[in-house]
Image (tube, grey):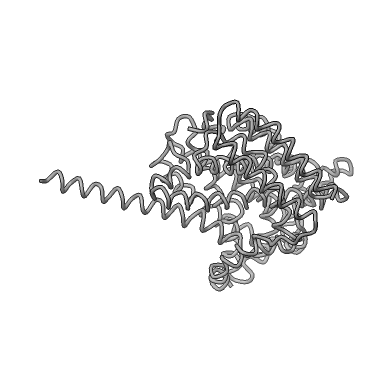
Amino acid sequence: MLSSLAIISIAVLITLYELPKMIKKKLKKESVTFCILLAIGTCFPVLMSFGVQIPNPLNWIILFIKPLTNMFGELLK
Amino acid sequence: MLEKGKISHTQLFILVMTFEIGTSILLAPFLMVAAAKQDAWISMLIGLSTGLLLVLFYAALIKRYSALTLVEMSEQVLGKWAGKGLSLLFFFYFLVLTAGLLRIIGDFITTHIMPETPITAIEITFMLIVIYGTRLGLEVFSRTSEVVLPWIMMFFFLLVFMLLPEIHLNNLFPLVEDGIKPVIKAAFLSLGVPFADVIVFLMITPAVSPSRKLGKVLFFSTLTGGMIIFVIVLMAILVLGPNQTTQLNYPIYVLAQRVNIGNFIQRIEVLAGGMVFIAIFIKTTISFYSLSLSFAQIFNLKEYKMLSFPFGMIVIFFANIMSPNIIFFQTFLFKSWTPIVLIFGILFPLLLLGIDTIKIGFNKRRNNILGSR
């Protein structure tokens, strides 16, 4: 609970620091991208702090690369 | 052009060299000695020569499009959508690379230097410096690398010379005990940890100011970096012996603990730790910079610096989630990392070079036909 509050407040601080500069320069697309990325970067840690199990993306990569791993493993046994 | 800074050949040389010794100084002794035992130094030499060939191949790619980064290059060669798709894959590769580096430095510090501190605290602190370096831009952190190079070299030579009395030459024998296969396997692993990662530099080379003779610079810096890793691997075998090196996660730190000259100069391991921090800082900054720059170029953004804070949060989160424990991470490094790096470091560049050659040949033939009419 406390850690999620800390993460959210850090995200708010980053937004307050970055967004006005971008709005002043009229960078519309950049500000939208910034907000989306920051939302992704905030949501997952907050979910994690509430104890939600987030799947490890490396497992997918390992599964995807498995034929190649096996091939090299056979080759270099 | 997103990056307005320019860097010189010397700076590129230092960046590539520190990039190569960055993590491999921690991981290469462990990974390669686990695969090839006392013959790891032979496989390091084989790996180094393969790495030099690879660098020459990257130089050929750079020569064709010296003003374009990897992302722009793939867009130029493959067309808009296929190029963006390939660049997105490279973006994820940079993400895994950066998060992995962050995890490795975190694991190193919590294992050896500050065992009571939570790993996330170390990762956040380290990431803040990396973000700071990225926001200041390529030119500034290249100059930083110039400043810190003497320290890296000094720590390295101090370590090697002080370890000379501890050497046991019979640790090297018997030579090639189990045949040539384990040696080749370790050489294969050495491609994954330092050498094929140099593909990241295709994001940086457009900023190097005289764009001629880049191949030469890349070649010699890979040679220097490779020789440093070779010496470290050799020292780990000579001083600790193959069995003890395999049991340790980070042999270089324990290697430095062995230094004892006349019961007076002892416990210089933090010097080795300092060398590791500096090298990994530069390596992480380069990959984080490439991460932000590649994203900005894929989505045609006008700036990349403002992406550093959101990406910093994502990378810290990713570093936490990607390795639930050290065994998982080491198995990943041992088994899956090298194939992944080979896909991104050899297959995709080869694809780009091949398609580009076919395109050039096709255009030339068409021009010839048009000209003969």
Position above or below: B188 against B198 = below
- Examine the image and state in which quarter residue B38 appears: bottom right
Q: Residue at x 63, y 57 (%)?
A: B41
The number of callouts visible is 0
Give whichever of B148, A55 is nearer the camera.
A55
Image coords of residue B273 (percent x, y) = 77, 44
Residue B327: name its quadrant. bottom right
B203 relative to B356 in the view: left or right:
right
Given residues B303 and B159, the one toward you in this image is B303
Residue farthest along the left direction in this orientation: B373
Q: Nearer the viewer, residue B341 or B254?
A: B341
Q: Is residue B364 above or below residue B28?
A: above
B368 above or below B304?
below
Of the pair B24 and B344, the residue shown nearer to us: B344
Q: Position of residue B214 (x, y in %)?
A: 46, 38
Residue B146 in sight in this render = no
- Residue at the location (61% across, 64% down)? A60
Residue B328 point in image, percent of width and height: 72, 63
Q: Residue B293 at x, y = what percent?
A: 55, 40
The answer to which quarter of the image holds residue B28 is bottom right
Q: Residue at x 86, y 43 (%)?
A: B266
Question: Looking at the image, which residue sits at the far top?
Answer: A24
Determine the residue positioned at 67% across, 50% down.
B99
In this rendering, does residue B322 appear at all? yes
